Image (spheres, helix red, strand yellow):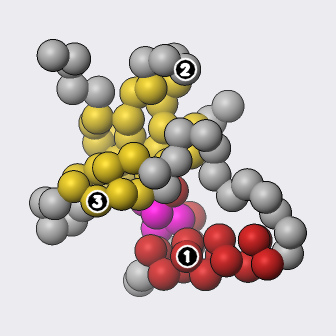
Amino acid sequence: MAEQSTQIALFEGRKIRRHWDQERGNWCFSVVDIVAVLSDSKNPAVYWRVLKKRLLDEGSDETVTNCNGLKMPAADGKMRLTDMADTV
């Protein structure tokens, strides 16, 4: 079985979920967690959902990278699908 490649990173004391993509050789980070840090929003999931819709409405054909839609542990402990982005 593959080694667990999902970890929590800290940025200014805030948790950011991340996943090592072995195939691509880079880290993918939870977009909602990044939005929470950058926007200081009380509901970063809604903030991201609205922003993503606006981007799509304005003609953007890609709002996140190819490693989006990974299941990550949520605040309630359940594995939930979340948008992911890398730094490349």
Report the quarter where the N terminus lies: top left
Q: Which residue is mark 3?
A: 80
Write down the quadrant of residue 85 in the picture.
top right
- Label 3, label 2: how many angstroms apart (C-alpha)? 22 Å
Report the quarter where the C terminus lies: top right
Q: Is residue 19 above or below residue 77?
A: above
Residue lying at 40% horizontally and 27% vertically, measured from the top left: 20
Left or right: 1, with 61 as reference point: left
Q: Which residue is mark 2?
A: 24
**Regarding mark 1 in the picture, which secondary structure is present there?**
helix
Residue lying at 44% horizontally and 26% vertically, measured from the top left: 21
**Regarding mark 3 in the picture, which secondary structure is present there?**
strand
Mark toward the start of the polypeptide (1 vs 2): 2
As shown in the figure, which amino acid type bears the numbered disc 3?
Arg
- Label 3, label 1: how many angstroms apart (C-alpha)? 15 Å
- Label 1, label 2: how many angstroms apart (C-alpha)? 26 Å
Write down the quadrant of residue 19 in the picture.
top left
Q: Residues within 10 Å of mark 3 (few under 14, many from 20)?
A: few
Q: Which residues are magenta?
A: 32-37
Q: Is residue 60 above or below residue 1?
A: below
Q: Which residue is mark 1?
A: 49
Determine if the magenta segment contains residue 8: no
Q: Is residue 66 above or below residue 84?
A: above
Residue lying at 21% horizontally and 65% vertically, measured from the top left: 75
As shown in the figure, which amino acid type bears the numbered disc 1?
Arg
- Give residue 50's position: percent from left, percent from top: 61, 81
- Give residue 5's position: percent from left, percent from top: 29, 27
